[in-house]
Image: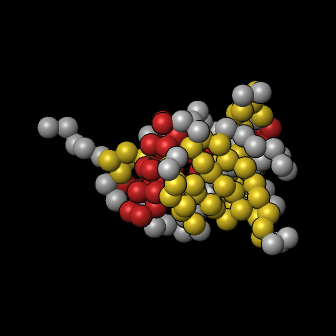
Amino acid sequence: MAGPPHRRQPGRAATPRPGSSSWPRTLRRSRRWLVKTATTVEGRASLDRAVAVHAAVSHPTIVRPTWTIHGTAGPTLVYPWYDGTVLNHATAHGTDRSALTRFQRLPVPQVEVALDAILDAHLAVSAAGLVAVDLYDGCFLYDFAADVALPAAPAVGQCRQFRPPP
């Protein structure tokens, strides 16, 4: 599923899935961005798929990169920064599930609104002939202050062309 990038501890890069790296950047002393680059051949393929998904799917919950910079190592995607926390933030150093625990304690109607937004985005992906093959709590970004849920970026490159069985 497409969407905004993971949010991190300030200044701390993370590798949300093997083959890619993303990190926050502040430009012009005010606007924050998340930059996502490939570090392996698999990561490049994932970012290439992300570019294709963003070209095919438009939905208010799916945050598009503001810039896509094509280079010899593959695309670099620059997303606008969104506050929030990945519900299950896994890194090479361990897993932080505190946001998931907090999300699970929200009132049921609030959780339903968040899940409806994410599932509606998946319908847009499906309408484009794609299937989001990587949907789990590590793909959800939730802004507790604003009560907003968005799919997180790594899932962008995990959409695949849907091919019905023969």
Coordinates of residue 46 in the picture (x, y in percent): 48, 44
Horizontal and vertical percent position of residue 139? 60, 44
Q: Which colour scheme is used?
A: secondary structure
Is residue 30 visible in the rendered image? The answer is: yes
**Relative vertical location of residue 57 with respect to residue 90 in this rendering, above or below:** below
Q: Which residue is drawn at 50% across and 58% down?
A: 70
Question: Which image quarter holds the C terminus?
Answer: top left
Residue 67 is left or right of residue 145, and the answer is left
Against 147, is 11 above or below? above
Question: To which quarter of the image does residue 29 belong?
Answer: bottom right
Residue 66 screen position, x and y as percent: 59, 68
Point 81% across, 44% down: residue:
12
Pinpoint residue 110: horizontal percent, then vertical percent: 69, 57
Seen as rendered, the residue at the extreme left is: 166
The number of discs equals 0
Task: Answer with left or right where residue 31 lies relative to residue 60.
Answer: right
Res. 105 in view: no
Q: Would residue 99 be found to the left or right of residue 62 on screen?
A: right
**Point 46% across, 57% down: residue:** 51
Name which residue lies at 43% across and 49% down. Answer: 49
Foreground pick, 68 / 124: 68
Front one among 63 and 140: 63
